[in-house]
Image: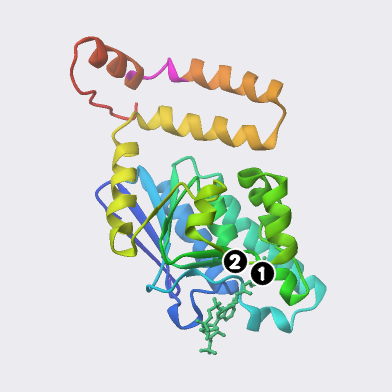
Amino acid sequence: MVFVKRRREKDIGWITVDRPDALNALNSNVLKELKVAADRMAADEKVSVVIVTGSGEKAFVAGADIKEMLGKTPLEMRSFTMLGHDAMNTIARMEKPVIAAVNGYALGGGLELALACDIRIASENTMLGVPEVKLGIFPGFGGTQRLTNVVGKGWAAEMVFTGRMVTAKEALSMGLVNKVVPLTDLTKEVKGLAGMIAKNGPIGVRLAKSAINMALEGSLTDGLAYERELVSLAFSTEDKEEGMKAFLEKRKANFKGK
Ligand code: CAA
């Protein structure tokens, strides 16, 4: 892998987009590597929580690669968009929780990548936006859908139609990011959050992610039916026995993911 680095620290898996010269812009190769990295994280049994970030101190990801896109025919752009959707969907649908450590510009496809993650923690220097209309196009890596799901139609429409960037603080006020911390504290913050999640019963967390995703994809009736089935499934696990007994015995649970 050239542009996307993967590493594991205990039970936390890191995926880093590493193309700092182009502010980590997403070209076809980056998108293919992102998908491979996400698939490998999903398959690594030692990884409980995944963190996605960008290389350097300036950008998380500054968007799809404009140089690569310029020469594309509509059909080539369609294939490129499929690559983008594939990478983002692989992250969004991964069973394990995924946190975006947003360490600077998150623009266009970069914000769409952060939106494919479950939780977004941003550094204070972060600027977020979907500036595609300034290029004569509009967000095409899931932004029209996932941004609307996260911040609601009013904010999404304003951000998409104006293309203006918002500060991390403004993003926090609209629910676009969960927390804002100084850049120097970002790694510690996301590791702490990942650690809190990793302590819990992994099957419960994964089933919960699947049920939460359903809230965005189906009706309330379907979502509640799905939730019922998954909660029942959670009752088939050893982790449920251990978690409940540990509570009653006033001790820490020792989850095995079984
Ligand atoms: N694609 C390709 N290259 C990019 C890029 C992008 N999205 N963003 C930045 N770069 C490159 C620049 O071309 C520049 O390269 P050179 O040194 O070779 O000239 C390098 O990264 C550094 O960028 P700047 O010199 O522009 O840095 P800056 O500090 O002056 O500005 C910025 C930073 C405000 C983020 C600015 O780079 C910028 O506006 N980038 C483009 C943001 C954008 O429009 N993103 C949306 C892309 S379209 C998209 O994502 C479509 C979709 O929905 C899928």
Is residue 80 depicted above or below 153 in this figure?
below
Mark 1 residue CB less than 8 A from any atom of ligand 1? yes
The mark found on residue 131 in the picture is 1
Q: Secondary structure at mark 1?
A: helix
235 within the magenta span: yes
For label 2, the residue is: 165
Mark 2 residue CB less than 8 A from any atom of ligand 1? yes
- Residue sitting nearer the eye, 161 or 21: 161
Q: Residue at x 37, y 32 (%)?
A: 202
Please provide the residue range marked out in magenta.
234-238
Left or right: residue 154 versus residue 61 is right
Q: Residue at x 63, y 20 (%)?
A: 224
Tell me, yes or no, whether the two marked residues, 1 and 2, touch with CB atoms within 8 Å: yes
Q: Which quarter of the frame holds ligand 1?
A: bottom right
- Give coordinates of residue 121: x percent, y percent: 42, 52
The answer to which quarter of the image holds residue 122 is bottom left
- Give coordinates of residue 184: x percent, y percent: 29, 64
Left or right: residue 47 versus residue 247 is right
